[in-house]
Image (cartoon, rainbow, N blue to C red):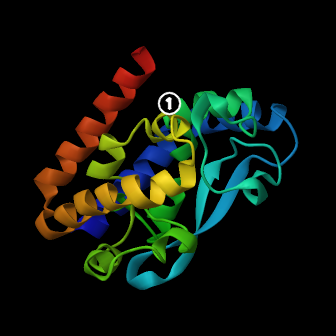
């Protein structure tokens, strides 16, 4: 049932949002070299890697300078990219991942292998389900970049402080997931995005 929901919602959303996709693609293309889309290997269901899609929000080869970003303070992010990240519009191409069956609309956010290696054994259960575009941890840490910007060592703060809290929220979601909870997560995600843009 969840897979059917994901398939039809992602297909409908891609059709309805096609004009927006074209506009954002043009803006990203005009923001500089590097292409419109950004692909990054993430760890999916059953620890199978897949290529996660986003609209490009950073300058070319930025990944070589580190995985994490720290909001307005990060010089790697383009002006258009900063807007895309703040509004979460950079995540829209993941609807293609959902359509392909690599992701769900709602599910634990997928991580790169580097950070999955830091998962304590009790949290590996979050890798038993399809990762999602949003989840309770995404809502709780919607301003994660700004939070990490305040840390003297953002990566250390992410691994030791943020990641364990996100995993706890993700594990709770996996153990209690149902259709109604997924709908609440979707609604709450939209509310938090609107609140963030208004602040």
Question: Looking at the image, how many numbered discs can be counted on the residues?
Answer: 1
> In the rendered image, which quarter is residue 184 located in?
top left
**Picture residue at 30% right of the left edge, 72% below the top:** 126
Residue 53 is situated, as x and y percent measured from the top left of the image, at: 60, 57
Q: Which residue is drawn at the image coordinates 31% and 38% (left, top)?
A: 189
117 up-or-down from 194: above or below: below
Residue 7 is situated, as x and y percent measured from the top left of the image, at 37, 62
Looking at the image, residue 182 sits to the left or right of residue 22; the answer is: left
Return the residue nearer the eye: 82 or 28.
82
User: What residue is at 86 percent from the left and 36 percent from the top?
Assistant: 32
> Considering only vertical position in the picture, is 63 above or below 74?
below
Q: Position of residue 165 (x, y in %)?
A: 30, 55
Q: Find disc 1 in the rendering and name its residue.
A: 87
Q: Decide if residue 21 is on the left or right side of residue 115.
A: right
Q: Nearer the viewer, residue 72 or 135?
A: 72
Quarter of the image where the C terminus is located: top left
- Quarter of the image holding residue 5? bottom left
Q: Judge whether residue 92 can be spotted in this image.
A: no
From the image, which quarter does the N terminus lie in? bottom left
The answer to whether 85 appears left or right of 193 in the picture is right
Q: Which residue does the image show at 80% across and 43% down from the upper left?
A: 59
Say whether residue 107 is left or right of residue 78: left
Considering every residue shown, the one lying at the far right of the view is 33
| Residue nearer the viewer, 116 or 96 | 116
Could you tell me which secondary element the residue under label 1 belongs to? helix
Residue nearest the viewer, comparing 132 with 101? 132
């Amino acid at each position: 049932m969840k897979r059917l929901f994901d398939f039809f919602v992602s297909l409908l959303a891609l059709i309805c949002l096609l004009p927006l996709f074209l506009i954002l693609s043009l803006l990203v293309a005009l923001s500089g070299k590097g292409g419109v889309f950004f692909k990054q290997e993430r760890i999916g269901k059953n620890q199978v890697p897949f290529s996660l899609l986003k609209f490009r929000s950073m300058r070319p080869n930025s990944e070589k300078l580190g995985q994490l970003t720290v909001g307005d303070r990060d010089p790697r992010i383009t002006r258009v990219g900063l807007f895309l990240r703040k509004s979460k519009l950079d995540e829209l191409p993941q609807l293609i991942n959902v359509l392909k069956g690599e992701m769900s609309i709602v599910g634990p956010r997928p991580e790169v292998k580097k950070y999955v290696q830091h998962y304590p054994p009790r949290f590996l259960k979050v890798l038993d389900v399809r990762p999602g575009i949003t989840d309770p941890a995404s809502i709780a840490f919607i301003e994660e970049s700004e939070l990490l910007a305040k840390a003297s060592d953002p990566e250390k703060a992410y691994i030791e402080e943020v990641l364990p809290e996100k995993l706890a929220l993700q594990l709770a979601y996996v153990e209690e997931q149902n259709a109604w909870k997924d709908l609440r997560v979707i609604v709450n995600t939209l509310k938090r995005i609107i609140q963030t843009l208004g602040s």
